[in-house]
Image (cartoon, grey):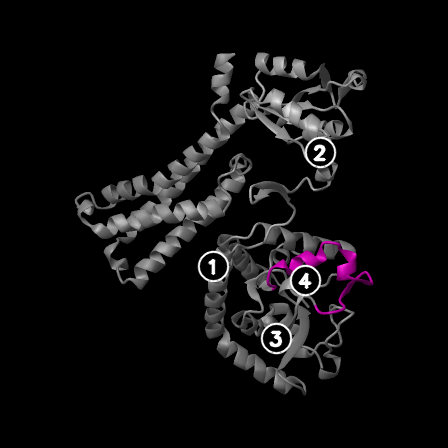
Amino acid sequence: MNSMRGLKSYTEAKLLWATRLADAAMPVFCAFGSQLVSEPSYRFWEESRFFVAVAAAMFLTANVFHNLDLYTMASLGNLQRQISRVILGWTAVMALLLLAAFAAKVSSNFSRLWTILWYASALIGFFGIRMVVSEIIRRWSEAGRLVRDVAVYGAGPQGRRLVEYLQRPGSGIRVVGLFDDREAARDIGSVAAVPFRGTLDDLIQYSRDHMIDQIVVAMPWTGERRIAQIMTRLSPLPIDVRLAPDMVGFTLAHCRYGDVAGLPVLNVFDKPLSAEKLVLKRIEDVLIAAGLLLVFSPIMLTVAALIKIGSPGPVFFRQTRFGFNNQPIQVWKFRTMYIEDCTDVIETQTLKDDPRVTPIGHWLRRTSMDELPQLINVLQGSMSVVGPRPHAQGTRAGNVLFEEAVSEYAARHRVKPGLTGWAQVNGWRGETDTLEKIQKRVDHDLYYIEHWSLMFDVKIVLMTILTILRGRNAW
């Protein structure tokens, strides 16, 4: 039994921290090794800038990899996902270092050969770490070391529902038994192949004879006195004891727990972006929008002239859409329709070969050039570069308003709308003529809101370029 408990002591947390430390150390070892290979006679230990570069690489790698969700058991078990994100993350780190060196006018102090060797060797090293960790996880899973053994006390409707919930595939939990003191519970037999093993006394003895990771008490919270008595009996055990949520908790099973002034509460919804993330995203928006306006200003002037020549009416079209917190905003676009068809409320989305669209408008829509004026919206602060796309008022899917078609639709407005989004780069761009299409778009938007990171935005921007070049679902 003691040897088994020793195996259990190698927790997931230890493996995750070992991976973090290995990742942080890899750029250091590879930087020194690459220097010895590229310039064996170079006395790099006398150069402070060399150590500054290595220290910056360690710091950036730790933060970028963390934001790319590379340090969870589920992520580490997926080698293909890890490799793609490591490539993205390490490339971003090197790009930031090169940009900083160029800005500081010290890039000439680092040889190109050393830089290439450092990048390639560290990348290979990161891959090697993940191959080892992936193999460890596979072996631990086969040996059952990643499965947590849980005993449930309470055989009423709440306890039975909890057992069924915990026994679902992929939960990582094995329910070893169901316990209850009530006479009626003894006739249950088993629930979801989990046997009924006896009373509270039996549970205490069972936990001492077997290796249990956790005991979950599943009883209605109205039985406060009974719950307190049970917790008192279980308190001497060196085992995690948890109180299962009341029946409403199963409806909100995706929620996590927190506290308010020390009182445990159920976190039904979290603020999508913290204050720090909002500042970071705003800096990102201003830098990207200002840079794109400078790059595309000649093209935008040319487009403006073509619009004026092509049909009578203004160059720009401003339309009221709903933005952050469901507040109306004025969205700028190049006018792509004939002036008599430009309305604030649109019940019919633009179709392929739509007669309302001008000849230059068809090209602008296909290349997404008509969206470029929304860079002004980004600088004004009403939009972001990346976020859920704002829809025109009254837009319908299958003759049903978007907000009526999808119950979670309004949750898209918990962040600022964007020029591009996770839905658009995954193929849910253009006409949403069916309920399935708007549901998929909303699902992707909500995923983006829940998983936002700076690198996620960078990934979407890069994918947007490829999507525009392909020109799919845009007319």
Q: What residue did someone put label 2 on?
A: 221
Percent of width and height locating residue 462: 52, 58
Q: Residues within 10 Å of mark 1 (few under 14, many from 20)?
A: few
Distance in Å between CA atoms under marks 4 and 2: 52 Å
Magenta part of the chain: 392-417
Front residue of this view, candidates 25 and 380:
380
Tell me which label, 4 or 1, sits earlier in the chain. 1
Q: Are marks 4 and 1 in contact (CB under 8 Å)?
A: no
Q: Residue at x 62, y 75 (%)?
A: 333
Q: Residue at x 73, y 68 (%)?
A: 352
Distance in Å between CA atoms under marks 4 and 1: 32 Å
Q: What residue did someone put label 3 on?
A: 332
Residue 473, which numbered label? 4
Residue 397 lies left or right of residue 11; in this view the side is: right
Distance in Å between CA atoms under marks 3 and 1: 24 Å
Tell me which label, 3 or 1, sits earlier in the chain. 1
Q: Nearer the viewer, mark 3 or mark 2?
A: 2
What is the three-letter code of the residue carrying label 1? Leu
Distance in Å between CA atoms under marks 3 and 2: 53 Å
Q: Nearer the viewer, mark 4 or mark 3?
A: 3
Q: Quadrant of residue 166?
A: top right
Front residue of this view, candidates 335 and 173:
173
Front residue of this view, candidates 30 and 183:
183
Q: Does the image show residue 278?
A: yes
Q: What residue did someone put label 1 on?
A: 280
Q: Nearer the viewer, mark 4 or mark 1?
A: 1
